[in-house]
Image (cartoon, helix red, strand yellow):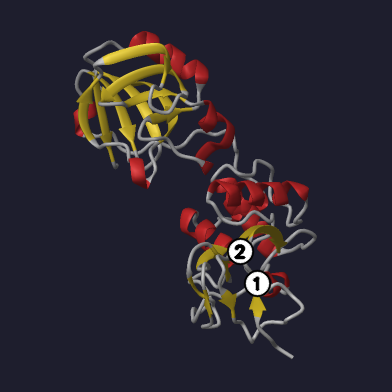
Amino acid sequence: MRHLHALRRLLARVVLTLGGAALLVAVGYAGSQVLAPDLDPDLDPVAGDVAAGGVPAPGAPPTATGAPSQVRPVVAGPTPHGRVVPGVAFEVLLVPGPTLLGPGEEGDDVRDLQARLRQIAWLSGAPDGVYGDTTTAAVSGFQAKREIPVTGAVDQRTTDRLLAMTTEPTEAELTGAVDDTASNAPGALDPRCLTGRVMCVDKTTSTLRWVVDGDVLRTMDARFGGSATATREGQFSVFSMSRDHVSSLYDTSMPFAMFFSGGQAVHYSPDFASVGYGGASHGCVNIRDLDGIAALFDEVQVGDAVVVYWS
């Protein structure tokens, strides 16, 4: 029989684990009665549904990626069932969706996943079609970087993000014939790069070339800012250089920094060297070749041109 629960000035915090995602339930009451006749009276009036598998968001379908939502009470408001619970409101949380591909599986779908992870430098070994510990770790790292619930298994949200960041693997990529150590292939030089001393930065091919009087003297892989902090495009000049620079804004190391536009600079990035294109800068042009950028720093002078363009 369902009945009335009366609780006074109670504050409870419960951390539950649901399918690998942590859900924090915070419930506050201030001398009010809670009427929830659709909940099991032997369970906490709010946590009961959560413990039984989570409370669906009120009247909302699954998320656009097909992954379910969870709700948590935070301030005053109605329950997801339409019952008024003074002192409680609900906030939608993301939890993992159903597993589409996971540890222990084998086959072409796993090989495709591995090839795509390899494209964005989350996996270095050749695809073997076996979803083992290495693939699980790569998927977990990708999920954590993209703020997707970390499970190490592929759900729809993970699939959608991975597809958006990669291209259809070629036969060479699927068989592991691609050399991971190979540099990016540069595109056509911008006409502005053909005169004088220029750091020519091609966003299309993710390369930086050091060009003097039209001759390419150095070519290095480059990485740029994300959508919120994009690397500015256009023609600039180096106005400041700092061999052992540390960012005052982000408190991160920026060795061999050559500033060309406000706080944006060409510099070595240990993160780029470590995780490749699985990350992004805050707007700078990241270089992962330490010896190359060190040599370039000794050759570049204040006043040299910087051209950032799409080939």
- Report whether 36 appears left or right of 103: left
Q: In what element is the residue under mark 2?
A: loop
- Given contact means CB atoms under 8 Å apart, are the residues at marks 1 and 2 in contact? yes
Secondary element type, mark 1: loop
- Against 294, residue 86 (above or below) is below
Residue at the location (65% across, 72% down)?
54
Instruction: Measure how far apart labels 1 and 2 are at the Cα level.
Output: 10 Å
Q: Residue at x 49, y 63 (%)?
A: 75
First-in-chain label (1 vs 2): 1
Q: Identify the residue at the far right of this view.
A: 104
Q: Residue at x 69, y 51 (%)?
A: 127
Q: Choose mark 1 or mark 2, whichever is in front.
A: 1
Q: Nearer the viewer, residue 245 or 303?
A: 245
Q: Residue 284: image x %, image y %?
A: 36, 30
Looking at the picture, which amino acid does disc 1 mark?
Gly
Q: Is residue 240 left or right of residue 23?
A: left
User: Is 18 situated above or below 266?
Assistant: below
Location of residue 164 in the rendering, given as x and y in whole percent from the top left corner: 47, 58
Q: Quadrant of the C terminus?
A: top left
Q: At 40% across and 33% down in the image, what residue appears?
A: 207
Tag 2 residue? 95
* Residue 168 position in % (x across, y down): 52, 59
Q: Is residue 40 shown left or right of residue 306?
A: right
In the image, 103 versus 81, the foreground residue is: 81
Query: Which amino acid, by three-letter code, is at mark 2?
Result: Val
Seen in the picture, residue 138 relative to 280 is either above or below; the reply is below
Which quarter of the image is occupied by the N terminus?
A: bottom right
Looking at the image, the residue that sits furthest to the top is 298
Binning the other alpha carbons within 10 Å of mark 2 as few (below 14), some (14 to 19) or many (20 upward) gives many
Q: Is residue 20 visible?
A: no
Question: What residue sits right under mark 1 in the picture?
Answer: 54
